[in-house]
Image: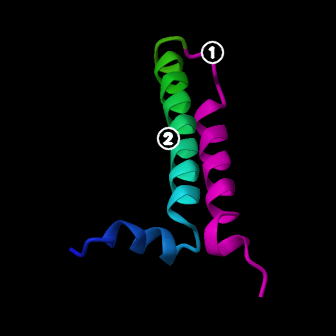
Amino acid sequence: MTKYSHFIHPNSVCMTYFQHMKFSAGLSKDMFIGSYKALIHSIFPNIYITSSGDVTKNLMNKLQRSGCNDKKD
């Protein structure tokens, strides 16, 4: 592992280190909220009925529009 190896992945997805950090932190927040809602739904099935599907669609949408995917040829 080189001294600057933590930049390899962000560069491979067309982001700077800080863009990648902000994007990943946002995904983490969305997953945390989704996890909380899924837990509540598991106990109370009539609450947050569509939350697992909603968070999945939201995450996929964000991933598809991020990094190299948002660049037009």
The residue lying at 35 percent from left, 66 percent from top is 6
Residue 72 covered by magenta stretch: yes
Disc 1 and disc 2 in contact, CB within 8 angstroms: no
Tell me which numbered mark, 1 or 2, is placed earlier along the sequence.
Answer: 2
**Real-space Cα distance between discs 1 and 2?**
22 Å
Residue 54 placed where, x, y %?
A: 67, 39
> How is colour applied across the structure in the image?
rainbow
Magenta extent: 45-73
The residue lying at 67 percent from left, 73 percent from top is 69
Q: Residue furthest bottom?
A: 73
Residue 46 placed where, x, y %?
A: 63, 14
The residue lying at 66 percent from left, 31 percent from top is 50
Q: Which residue is mark 2?
A: 28
Up-down: is 50 above or below 60? above
Does the magenta stretch mainly form a helix, a strand or a loop?
Answer: helix
Q: Quadrant of residue 72?
A: bottom right
The residue lying at 59 percent from left, 46 percent from top is 56
Please tell me the numbered disc located at residue 6: none
Q: Which residue is mark 1?
A: 47
Q: Is residue 50 left or right of residue 31?
A: right
